[in-house]
Image (spheres, grey):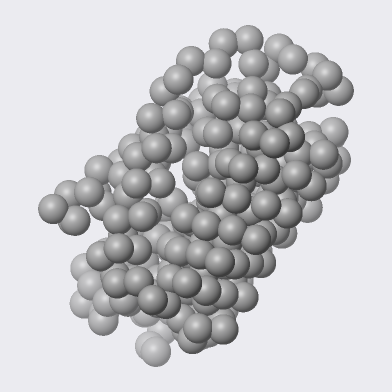
Amino acid sequence: MNIEFILLLFMIGFIGSFISGMVGIGGSIIKYPLLLYIPPLWGFVAFTTHEVSGISAIQVFFATISGVFAYRKGGYLNRSLIIYMGISILIGSFIGGYGSKLLSEEIINLVYAILATIAALLMFVPNKGLDDIPLNQVTFNPALAAVAAFIVGGASGIVGAAGAFILVPIMLVVLKIPTRMTIATSLAITFISSIGSTVGKILTGQVLFLPSIIMVVASVIASPIGAMVGKKVNTKMLQVILAVLIVTTSIKIWLDLF
């Protein structure tokens, strides 16, 4: 692996992790397509879909640790929500991550495209007044939260994501969690999810460790910076940024599938 390829991977990891820390996602919504499409454009050998999903799983594991650490103060982490959704998403993501070895590249990309499309549609559902709710008065439906997390975990485990890019819209639109609490709490849930998908990918030999290490180094540096910026950015702007990222990626994947 030459120095140019290492630098390219580092930049992909840095950009994706900065944005993920800012908007509360694990970064796979950005890095999955970047890892698939950018290396060939620069004349390097393309990663397979299984390799991209494996690298993404490892990277998300470390990116979310950094993001949660940055949000640990301020009362933004909802511990009850983390417990209910974390346990469910861990089980689902391990099943998805382990079972993904049996799926074709086309099926993995299809699952990713469906996830991104659902997330994109949810981002445009109005949620006025959501951020006026005091953080100590936030309530949610535990059963609905657990079921949603299990389904997201299974699907996201397949593509090596931790599911935050669909978890965030679900928490905002379905569970009615305020934006900043959603961003912080989703990072913690995403970290738990990434454990399951990472173990599943490693056990089935889908992880390239050197590219993964490069992406991890970039993530540990960039994710906390993004989280600090996210605390200062208007919540509506954060939602717009996330919506644009999800819609753009969804369109690109669907175009490639057809």
**Snapshot quadrant of residue 251:** top left
**Snapshot quadrant of residue 184:** top right
The residue shown at (55%, 25%) is 173
Residue extending farthest bottom = 1
The residue shown at (45%, 64%) is 158
The residue shown at (26%, 81%) is 45
Which x, y percent locates residue 75?
Answer: 85, 33
Above or below, 173 relative to 114: above
Above or below, 149 relative to 55: above
Q: Is residue 128 left or right of residue 107?
A: right
Residue extending farthest left = 258
Above or below, 125 relative to 44: above
Q: Quadrant of the N terminus?
A: bottom left
Which x, y percent locates residue 49?
Answer: 33, 71
Q: Is residue 156 left or right of residue 254?
A: right
Which x, y percent locates residue 17?
Answer: 55, 55
Which x, y percent locates residue 106?
Answer: 25, 65
